[in-house]
């Protein structure tokens, strides 16, 4: 029996380690986690990473798309967030994680067309492999993550929704993202660091 104890303990540790890895993979980033950098293709054909903008204090990373009604409803609000916060060091980076085979209107060509029509002042990146969306734990469009630069790292400061009304910007009562940004820009943790993202489910590649 005594000989079995070390083996049982090793099995338990392995199982616990596997569980934690699966949990991390399933849930993605939490507030306070370091966000890994990425390189994704922008609509202009160039690769963009978090580290590429040396002047950025952080980013408002938005997983969004062309086709989702929620993404369309929030589009102008996303543009306005970039206009407001880019001069303060937190530009928007929009990422389209949808598989165009499932959502044909989210092809790279359609992304280029949309960005041109709406005159996006921020990168609109294609997450072709969907690895970045999975890493972040994004499940919806739109799904927002504020990441703040700390030395050479980017740390997640806020996750969730832009505000409390996905249909009409005029009826918004609570601006979750802007409230969080007020705290973040003041050098404090967001009072409300996470909210529930409301939107269409990401169109994942079929197995």
Image: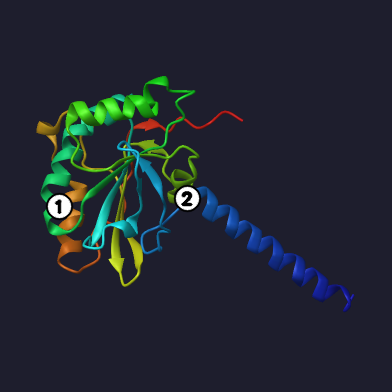
The residue located at (11%, 49%) in the rendering is 84
Quarter in which the C terminus is drawn = top right
Residue in the image at 43% along x and 55% along y: 29
Occupied quadrant, residue 66: top left
Label 2 crowd (10 A; few <14 / some 14-19 / many >=20): some
Residue 57 position, x and y percent, is 22, 63
Q: Which residue is mark 1?
A: 85
At x 40%, y 26%, the residue is: 107
Residue 182's place in the image compared with 48, above or below, is below
Residue 89 is situated, as x and y percent measured from the top left of the image, at 17, 59
Name the disc covering residue 135, or none.
2
* SS class, disc 1: helix
Question: On the rendered structure, is 113 left or right of 183?
Answer: right
Quarter of the picture holding the N terminus = bottom right
- Nearer-the-camera pick, 109 or 75: 109
142 to the left or right of 201? left
Looking at the image, the residue that sits furthest to the top is 104
> Which residue extends farthest front?
45
Figure quadrant of residue 69 = top left
Find the residue positioned furthest to the bottom.
Answer: 2
Task: Find residue 23 and report its image quarter.
Answer: bottom right
Q: CA distance from mark 2 to mark 1?
A: 25 Å
Mark 2 and mark 1 lie on one chain; the one further toward the N terminus is 1
The residue at 48%/40% (across/down) is 130
Badge 2 element = helix
Q: Is residue 123 visible?
A: yes
- Please provide percent x and percent y for residue 53: 26, 58
Mark 1 neighbour density, 10 Å: few (under 14) some (14–19) many (20 or more): some
């Amino acid at each position: 029996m005594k000989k079995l104890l070390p083996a049982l303990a090793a099995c338990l540790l392995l199982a616990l380690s596997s569980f934690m890895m699966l949990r991390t993979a399933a849930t993605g980033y939490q507030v306070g986690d370091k966000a890994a950098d990425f390189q994704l293709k922008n609509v202009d054909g160039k690769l963009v990473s978090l580290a590429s903008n040396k002047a950025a204090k952080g980013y408002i990373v938005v997983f969004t798309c062309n086709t989702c009604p929620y993404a369309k409803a929030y589009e102008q609000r996303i543009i306005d967030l970039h206009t407001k916060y880019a001069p303060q060091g937190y530009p928007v980076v929009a990422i389209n994680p949808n598989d165009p085979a499932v959502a044909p209107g989210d092809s790279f060509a359609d992304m280029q067309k949309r960005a041109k029509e709406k005159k996006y002042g921020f990168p609109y990146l294609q997450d072709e492999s969907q690895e970045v969306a999975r890493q972040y734990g994004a499940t919806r469009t739109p799904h927002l993550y504020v990441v703040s630069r700390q030395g050479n790292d980017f740390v997640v400061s806020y996750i969730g929704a832009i505000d409390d009304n996905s249909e009409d910007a005029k009826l918004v009562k609570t601006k979750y993202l802007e409230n969080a940004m007020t705290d973040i820009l003041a050098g404090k943790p967001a009072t409300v660091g996470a909210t529930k993202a409301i939107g269409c489910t990401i169109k994942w590649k079929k197995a």
